[in-house]
Amino acid sequence: MIEFLDWMLPPAKSTMAGETDALFYFINIVSFIFLVGITIAILYFSWRYRRRSEEDVTPVITHNNKLEITWSVIPLILVIIVFGWGFTGYLNSITPPEDAYEIRVVGKSWLWEFHYKNGAVSVNELHVPANRPVKLVMTSSDVIHSFYVPDYRIKRDVLPNRYSSVWFEAIEPGESVIFCTEYCGTAHSDMIASVIVHEQKDFQRWLATSASEGEDQSPVDLGKSLVERNACLTCHSVDGTEQLGPTFQGIWQREQTMQSGETVIADENYIRESILEPNAKIVEGYNAIMPSFSGSLDDRQIDAIIEYLKTID
Amino acid sequence: MATEETARIKKLQVQRYKPEENPKVHFLNAEKGIWSWLTTIDHKRIGIMYLASIAVFFFIGGMLAILLRTELLTPAQNFVDANTYNQIFTLHGAIMIFFFLIPSVPAALGNLILPLQLGCKDVAFPRLNLASYYIYVIGALFTLTAIFTGGLDTGWTFYTPYSSTTSGSNVLLMTLGIFILGFSSILTGLNFIVTIHKLRAPGLTWSKLPLFQWSLYATSIIQVLATPVLAITLLLLTMERALSIGIFDPNLGGDPVLYQHFFWFYSHPAVYIMIVPGFGVISEIISTFSKKTIFGYWAIALSSLAIAFIGFLVWGHHMFTAGQSSLANMVFSFLTFLVGIPTGIKIFNWLATMYKGSIDMKTPMLYAMVFLFLFTIGGFTGIMLGALSVDIHVHDTYYVVAHFHYVMMGGMVMAFLGGLHYWWPKMFGKMYSEYWAKISCAIIFIGFNMTFLPQFVMGSQGMPRRYYNYIDQFQPFHQFSTIGSYVLGIGFFIMFGYLLHSLLRGKKATANPWGSRALEWQVSSPAPQHNFEHTPVIINGPYDYHKPMSEFQLGIAGSHNGHGSDADISQTNKEQAADKAK
């Protein structure tokens, strides 16, 4: 049975997961025992007391207070145990240690943005050190999202105009998936990111280099990797497929009609504006749904993306 | 109380009235033509109109579910795009909850049976009852308009700020539809409360009230008290959208979590509006088919009221991850567990009723057993969700989806189907094929478990709900679940087939095919137009199977029913048994 329950849960990769899992096992096992008992009673009674003739006479048993009290008090004790257990586990999960490493998280429809203390920013990839508590301070730039890492057993809603936080301590280097679990519109199910856990040293190295990343790359290559990493492809295709946003294929110098009726040629300034103020001009037939990348992409990165977009045809 | 009663004792002449078998004139054919149906104030006809309406909505909601499951066969796009998928799950939820589940037992079965079980001719306010039905229809029209003019994709919960920024005016139409619908629910509840208080037959004291009535009573209280909160919430949402008054939208200075509090303050009690009347149906069925006094009458009756009361205080368990204070989370978690206790009491009492009974496994009883099994799973997984630390992990995943389908469909829908099969002869005077009914019940049971058991597993593994795409590791579970939903669909089509056959060609039913002691079975099938040709007198409890049937067919001797002269009642077989009356 434990093996089956183990299979029901994702791998436990945070310090907190063990306690949650233990309660999960406990409730499942106790419930299973009760369910088997009830099922056996149903089947046995149905067979043992099946109707033999229409003249069957049944005994008059109206109630039994001892029984009523027994089957009220035993479940009551069990649920109080479950309540206490669940509550203490919850208290641990909302009380981050003092020395937790803090990372800011912004949920946008439909991507996750992570801001680190040294100014580094990553999209859809949360880099954290192993064996060190990490506290996420989260907010949303539009509707409600929810930050969920199944491997860590943590989840917290991310609200606009408000901060919420969650903490965890990853126990080993590796990768885990992040889901958005509060319905947020068309690409809700594509709002998937991953946590990448590094050894302490590797994490420091990643932090130091991420700001100057791509200096040894050509602008086109850097732009390509930025477009992939910043979740642009959730809505924009590079092969002409119709998605939520206009395709990148042949976008350079393309003439497009806007909702306002004016026509615009996709040049450097238009692309730059579309990244930093996406809702300033909306191409006809599309909705104003793109979040702003102002603050998460710097000038060098925007230049690289423009260079890359020039090459897609 | 006893002294007060003795002071008011009045001697009544009673006699036995045996129900007429297969009467030529009954409520279905006493008046003819479509107009007589549309303007009827007969509670039974209104009940049947509700039944037909919810059947239509159940079909629409069910087909939407099949579409959803078919799309989920593969991780990426299968045959609908993301926006369509989001609209489909929104409509599936909204239709099933507001247009099927909430009116299913109270408005449809309740209307049909409540006055018959109380021994009165109709509900207290028959015209209001008809008005409730038309309010329901108007609400439904608004909703259908919203569907056919482009749909909406907010989820049935309409969470702000998403719902205040998307889908254009359809959100307004839909919420307005549900706002209107709420009044139907409130008025039905009010009608039932007054009827149960004021129109009980002579001798029908509170301690002899059938448990179905107790459950309808508890449900009506919730309907009257909770539904206005939904109405206010939806009105505020409409004001925010239409007039840009900042209440919930943070961009206008509002608070999105406030909306969740308001919404669940109604919608959690609404869960009990859906399930509590189901408990009542199950009590009736188990006692009848075990041919035995119900075990723990007061335990079952009062636990319904306890659930109705505590059910008002647990709404916060929908927001454990939303950022309410730890204290609030603790209190809501604790109260959530408390509400599990009366539910458990019911299950044990039903089992105890079967002990040493004379169990006839007819279709309604089979559904009651399916209910016991599935609802128990639904209850235990509810305990899992009430535990704070575990809920953090499984909140908003398929675990929750599976849990509430076990409660709502495995619980409520099974109870409803049990009740439908139980009272079918009383409604239409026809029997259905017992053979096909059992086969369809078995297929529904298998299909249901195939659909929703895998969802517990993938939910525990982290599959979030309302996902159009999913990661590959979940595909086997989704595929198994989809196949299960097809099996479930086949089960319902068989049911549709044999019920239709029963209506057209079914064998005639006797007045009391199950040998029940309950009052509604002491009139002919289908019921007479005005229910009772005499004023019934109650001297025994509704589950007193040790008393002879003749003691359950008493009426005031010589009195007339108000619809003819009193002279045509032949006074035979006078019994002086009755000693109680108001």
Image (cartoon, coloured by chain):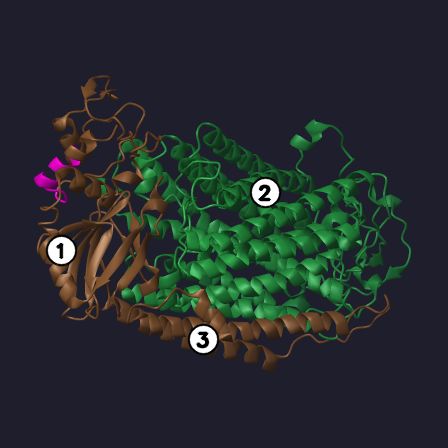
Chain colours: A brown, B green
> Disc 2 marks which amino acid?
Phe
Q: Which mark is residue B58?
A: 2
Judging by the rendered image, the residue that carries numbered circle 3 is A26
Query: Is there a contact, CB below 8 Å, between mark 3 and mark 2?
Result: no
**What residue did someone put label 1 on?**
A116
In the rendered structure, which segment of residues is drawn in magenta?
A295-306
Task: Judge by depth and name the residue closer to the eye, A58 or B564.
Answer: A58
Dot in front, 2 or 1: 1
Which chain's residue wears label 1?
A: A
Front of the two marks 3 and 2: 3
Q: Amino acid at mark 3?
A: Phe
Q: Secondary structure at mark 3?
A: helix
The residue under the point 59% across, 82% down is A66
**Label 2 CA crowd tier, 10 Å (few <14, some 14–19, many 20+):** many
Left/right placement of residue A267 relative to residue A28 reads left
Could you say which disc has been placed on residue B225 in the image? none
A217 is within the stretch colored magenta: no
Q: Does residue A199 appear to the left or right of B69 in the view shown?
A: left
Q: Are marks 2 and 1 on the same chain?
A: no
Depth order, front residue of A307/A153: A307
